[in-house]
Amino acid sequence: MAKKSKDSRSQIILECTEHKASGLPGTSRYITEKNRKNTPDRLELKKFNPIMKKYTVHKEIK
């Protein structure tokens, strides 16, 4: 059986852009993984923001 390498797969944090711009207290963040070989640029996904109670754009930070 082949050995699995975790070098290309890394953990990232997604943060809500609309919430950050609105000035409301708190933050909406999600932790996920991505393959750095297939997606070298920053990830952008629509996720649910429980504080604003709607789906918003979350961008990769750091």
Image: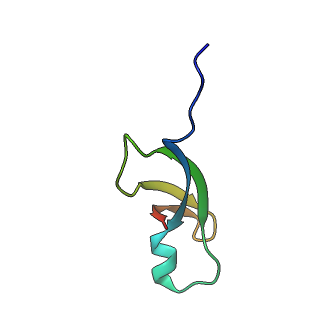
* Scheme by which the image is coloured: rainbow
Q: Is 26 located above or below residue 40 in the figure?
A: below
Q: Camera-side residue: 41 or 55?
A: 41
Residue 45 position, x and y percent, is: 44, 54
Q: Camera-side residue: 60 or 16?
A: 60
Q: Is 27 located above or below residue 38 in the figure?
A: below
- Which quarter of the figure is the N terminus placed in? top right
Residue 30 position, x and y percent, is: 60, 58
Residue depicted at x 56% and y 33%: 5
Residue 51 image-quadrant placement: bottom right
Residue 22 position, x and y percent, is: 48, 83
Q: Camera-side residue: 53 or 1?
A: 1
Residue 31 image-quadrant placement: bottom right
Which residue, as the protein is rendered here, is positioned at the far top? 1
Q: Is 57 located above or below residue 18 in the figure?
A: above
Residue depicted at x 65% and y 78%: 26
In the rendered view, does 60 fall on the left or right side of 28? left
Residue depicted at x 58% and y 84%: 24
Q: How many marks?
A: 0
Residue depicted at x 43% and y 46%: 36
